[in-house]
Amino acid sequence: MARTRLLQAINDAIVEEMERDQKVVVYGEDVELSIVGDLRGVYAKFGRDRIRNTPICETTLTGMAVGLAAAGYRPVVQMMFANFLYTGMDSIANQMAKLRLMTGGQISLPITIIATIGGGSSNAAQHSDTNYPALMNLGGLHVAVPATPADAKGLVKSAIRNPNPCFVLEPNGRGGESGDVPDGEYLVPLGKAAVRREGDAVTVVAIGRMLKPALAAAAGLAAEGIGAEVIDPRTLVPLDYDTILGSVAKTGRLVVVDEAREACSAASQIAAVVAERGFGSLKGPIRRLCTPNVAMPYAPNAEAHVIPNEARIAAAVRELAVGARVTA
Amino acid sequence: MARTRLLQAINDAIVEEMERDQKVVVYGEDVELSIVGDLRGVYAKFGRDRIRNTPICETTLTGMAVGLAAAGYRPVVQMMFANFLYTGMDSIANQMAKLRLMTGGQISLPITIIATIGGGSSNAAQHSDTNYPALMNLGGLHVAVPATPADAKGLVKSAIRNPNPCFVLEPNGRGGESGDVPDGEYLVPLGKAAVRREGDAVTVVAIGRMLKPALAAAAGLAAEGIGAEVIDPRTLVPLDYDTILGSVAKTGRLVVVDEAREACSAASQIAAVVAERGFGSLKGPIRRLCTPNVAMPYAPNAEAHVIPNEARIAAAVRELAVGARVTA
Amino acid sequence: MAMTGAGERQSGSHPGAGPSPDEAVRLYETMLLIRRTEERLRDDAAAGKLPGAVHLYLGEEAVAAGVCAHLTDRDYITSTHRGHGHFLAKGGDVKTMMAEIWAKREGICRGMGGSMHVADVSKGILGANGIVGAGLSIAAGAAFGAKLDGRGRAAACFFGDGASNQGALMETLNIASLWQLPVIFVCENNGFSEFTPAAQVTSGRIADRALAFGVPAAEVDGNDVTDVWRAAGEAVARARAGGGPSFIEARTYRIQGHFEAESFVLGGGSYRDDHEIDKWREADPVSRFRSVLLESGTLDEAALGRIESAVAARVAEAAAFAAAGQPADPALAETLMFAPEEG
Amino acid sequence: MAMTGAGERQSGSHPGAGPSPDEAVRLYETMLLIRRTEERLRDDAAAGKLPGAVHLYLGEEAVAAGVCAHLTDRDYITSTHRGHGHFLAKGGDVKTMMAEIWAKREGICRGMGGSMHVADVSKGILGANGIVGAGLSIAAGAAFGAKLDGRGRAAACFFGDGASNQGALMETLNIASLWQLPVIFVCENNGFSEFTPAAQVTSGRIADRALAFGVPAAEVDGNDVTDVWRAAGEAVARARAGGGPSFIEARTYRIQGHFEAESFVLGGGSYRDDHEIDKWREADPVSRFRSVLLESGTLDEAALGRIESAVAARVAEAAAFAAAGQPADPALAETLMFAPEEG
Ligand SMILES: Cc1ncc(C[n+]2csc(CCOP(=O)(O)OP(=O)(O)O)c2C)c(N)n1
Ligand SMILES: Cc1ncc(C[n+]2csc(CCOP(=O)(O)OP(=O)(O)O)c2C)c(N)n1
Ligand SMILES: [Mg+2]
Ligand SMILES: [Mg+2]
């Protein structure tokens, strides 16, 4: 165990995988000096045949990953902000997500794409999207959203070893956050959620950057005698529905916290599946806390106004829990 | 009233709006001869200052629409297959959906984008996506999915007159279908669902191309004494939740049929909202019938295997309705 | 005269040694195989036997044949929506390709891909592609891998004049030039994007776009397989030797419509006149090369006849194989999406 | 000598008449306003007063000033993430721009956009843009509108050397050339994309990319406002006269880091040496033009002093206005998303 910053954990994971497998090649805009910070020092260590700066041309960066993977490599593409995925969306949606089926399973594409998501840093609308819903809807892509340094390391390593395209979306602005990371080889499997806190009254599923306020809310609610069980799905494709359904079977109540915009969000997806497969155990409505269907504003107070926070999470859980008491 | 093919209805709508407003300008790849067919004869009538062929460069086609709208025009962009929206996604996601808020409301973008969605024609994975979930999640965009010629005409006209970006997604392969279209000026408001068939046992929300099998299933179920109420949302942004919630308040049961892939689908969104706001009236689980999270296969039998159809809709409704009888 | 990146564009018939007699025979066989296969698919499409859209390569055979003659299974190609010719020229199997287009279980993509996605990864055929321009960056990526391998492999990217208006072309030219990637850009300029004439949507000379990035470029007669073969030989040699990318613009023409449903879609509209088509029929690459073989004494009528009946038999056999195939396995749509985790 | 699209690139100091004394004074005022504003924002950023990232234009003032001097409120510009200078040169208000960057309710975008999105649509400023290369197609669209209007309006598109590697550049060059759009492509070549030197990511000469599409291109000294002014004057005149697009590559340099958090982000790493920065400081466009004004006798020290204190006062007033502003109205994030339906 060592206290590590999330960016450093990603860096450690990439370095370990580059040492482990010569076929792992990293590229992107400004990766050599690492403007994002998660690749600092990698260039000095491995040189330009393993990591290189590219021109600004996202359309080609995502497309090249397909060809490089087809040629037997394991590209790791650093795309900076997830908004820039739109610029490279054609190869993501029309190639990465589809080529394997279109070729009758001839091809496998061990591609890892890293980008930062989310608001909260006054980066404004074009640098703040939480856009995993679009990726989830494409099929054929894995999506990981680490919320802790340990998961960041374990999920990046699993993504790089996975034979399919995997997106690892770092929570924006968390580079500075530290957490314990197990020493040595540490893998977190894709598709396994983590129960971050146990509770019996309400299940709270909190995605990525929303985990922290959810845990804070749960701690506060405990003092009120309300037991919130907090689940971090860790990956959205594959999504560990069993853990969520199991928890709802116990609590009968569900709140999903998702920084993505509300329409067709991951929260909507989780709510829909529980309303389908877990309906029998539901004792009350499913509450979703998301960013409304807006472009992220620049002003800090406006950002705070639209992004789910501890107070709103606590209020939603409390509201459902009251129902819980009554029926109890 | 006149029997009109869906493609012709769109053509009529565009011609009428071009006559009504000189600022309506149409462009896209091969629009002059109209490979898609919904613009046939428009070039001969209006000439190249009102409709023109472009090079193949979707990135620029969507971006130019923003500039042309900012210059006071009402661009109508024909993008052919909705899969090509990915190639032009940057300006859709980072500009069209965000510029109005980013400029503090200074700009309005009366842009209409037309594309065909869906499978069923052995066009294979790169020409069969039903990708409105990604558009719905962006915020700032209207999305219409006409299922009948009359709605196609009325929604295209409303989209062109609307001061915001509107996507009109034609169901692929329905160009040949005919339906009655009211004569003269006919507008269908954005955000108003249509109850296509009344029923008391189960609410069936069927989107776009799924309306036809849903109505067929409902007709068959009526013979079994099961009353399915079939709702066509017509637009997904804005989405007429009140009509859906009102119906569920009556039936207590909901099936959503959506050709989009299941994860973060419009079906998931509708199910989530009903599980939140309509939970009290639900008597059973919400069933979603979607395309699984796969790339659309080429072989007709494989396409038929993954796209929701009449038999699957009937089975889902029947399953819920049985519950209805029991509790009744 | 070598191709040049020094701002000077090379045009017209391409100098240098021609193909050997054996190579010439193989070129003819390849072109003929494509010709007969496409004719058969044209007829099968007209008879309503093919479920999806088919874009035929009739009239353009010399480009795929002339380029792929220099490539082995270890090299890569990316192709277009009009990809049957590239698939066959690169050594793809005509039987499993036809079965694929027929949507059969025996198809090279097990019926999941169809005409626009025929691929044989084991032969370096990374696939026909339904997205115009998408093959450019895929080829650049494969070439990047080949460069890292350092084993002299190359990647050829086929794309149309219409595709050359996608920004992806310039992005990949830039990266290929900077990284000296072993990639050959092959622009098949058949004068149209769907129903739109190139003059309406393509400004300047396409080869100049390559020169602006320091990529050597040549314009060749795409209906003269020898000319294509020479230019491609030079480009592939440069790629293998570490000399970086090359650009070839092959002027050719598509004899069929954009796709086989064209006349239905056009509904009476027209975008080219029959004289133009007739003019190009006279420049037919297959019969032109046939005459060359005769006149050069490489083959006599008897030998040519043997080749022609052999090819006809192969195509007939492939069509029978496709027709007799089993329907695709629908379950594959779900089971094939993700590759199983290794180890 | 006029710019040329005939394959010949024009370089070096740009011939033709220079600005009149009045125009010269306005050019100096504009450059100075940008200079002082950016210096103030640099200090405010260092003091932690600005919530978001700021990309400063210090050292590049001559490009925005020289180009926008030829434009009126009826013309359009699109800008970049480094857009303060373009906004001010095109006539944007310094007070509401500063208030925007301070995230205040009084901001030109009501605090919803910030530094990377300053826009004033009423003045044809379609906005700074956080997506590299996005302004290209927006400018082409605005120019298409201007062309349809037929009232002699033009659109100028500012973008960097890094942006010139986005395929969007070539797509818009192609369409602008085909449709003869009244658009001026202004490439601000400051030698870097973030921390990456142009030589590593940009092949060939950028101006050649325009020539390949038949778009006249000129390379000018971006730190010589007269040179920029002349080339832009010719380009704007061509656009207004229906002569189609032009391309200007202005060679310049950014004195500040890529953005104000650079040293923090670099964490000790470095990508350029101080000598280079010092060399370019000596070519400072503002002081260079100040000397020109003195030597030409256009203005004396006293007159320059009056201008300088007037500009300093404007900037101080703007900063005070921004600092005293109200926090943004959070509700706007939801109420502004859609324009209300007309009629
Ligand atoms: C990104 C994208 N845009 C549009 C289309 C529709 N489309 C298919 S083929 C074609 C024309 C391509 O022309 P060209 O590249 O010259 O190839 P050709 O058909 O002439 O061989 C178009 C526009 C597409 N498949 N993909
Ligand atoms: C599509 C996209 N990709 C990447 C970025 C990140 N980014 C911001 S500025 C920049 C460098 C731009 O360089 P250049 O165009 O030369 O402009 P300069 O900063 O030098 O003025 C990059 C890569 C972005 N904002 N948008
Ligand atoms: Mg063509
Ligand atoms: Mg730069």
Image: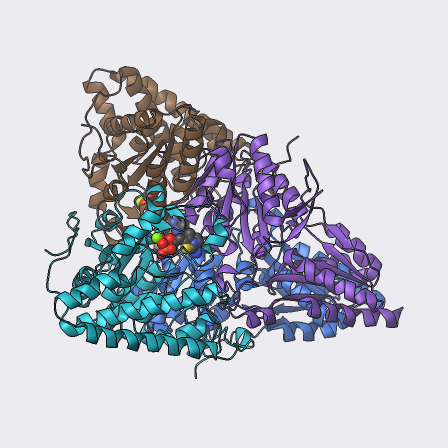
Chain colours: A purple, B blue, C brown, D cyan
B93 vs B199, left or right, is left
Q: In which quarter of the image is residue A16?
A: top right
Quadrant where the C terminus of chain D sits is bottom left
Q: Quadrant of residue B91?
A: bottom left
Q: In which quarter of the image is residue C5?
A: top left
Q: In this view, does A33 lie above or below D337?
A: above
Residue at 55% x, 40% y: name it. Answer: A101
Q: Nearer the viewer, residue C192 or A11?
A: A11
User: Residue B159 location in percent, x, y?
Assistant: 45, 71
Residue at 68% x, 64% y: name it. Answer: B271
User: Residue D339 location in percent, x, y?
Assistant: 46, 76
Quadrant where the N terminus of chain D sits is bottom left
Residue lying farthest to the right in this orientation: A328
Residue at 46% x, 31% y: name it. Answer: C319
D307 vs D43, left or right, is left
* Number of numbered discs overlaid on the protein picture: 0
User: Residue C8 location in percent, x, y?
Assistant: 18, 37
Residue lying farthest to the bottom in this orientation: D343
Residue lying farthest to the front in this orientation: D302
Q: Which of B246 and A138 is in front in this view?
A: A138
Q: In this view, does B76 lie above or below C250?
A: below
User: Residue D289 location in percent, x, y?
Assistant: 21, 64
D105 vs B314, left or right, is left
Q: Is residue B81 visible?
A: no
Q: Is residue C164 visible?
A: yes
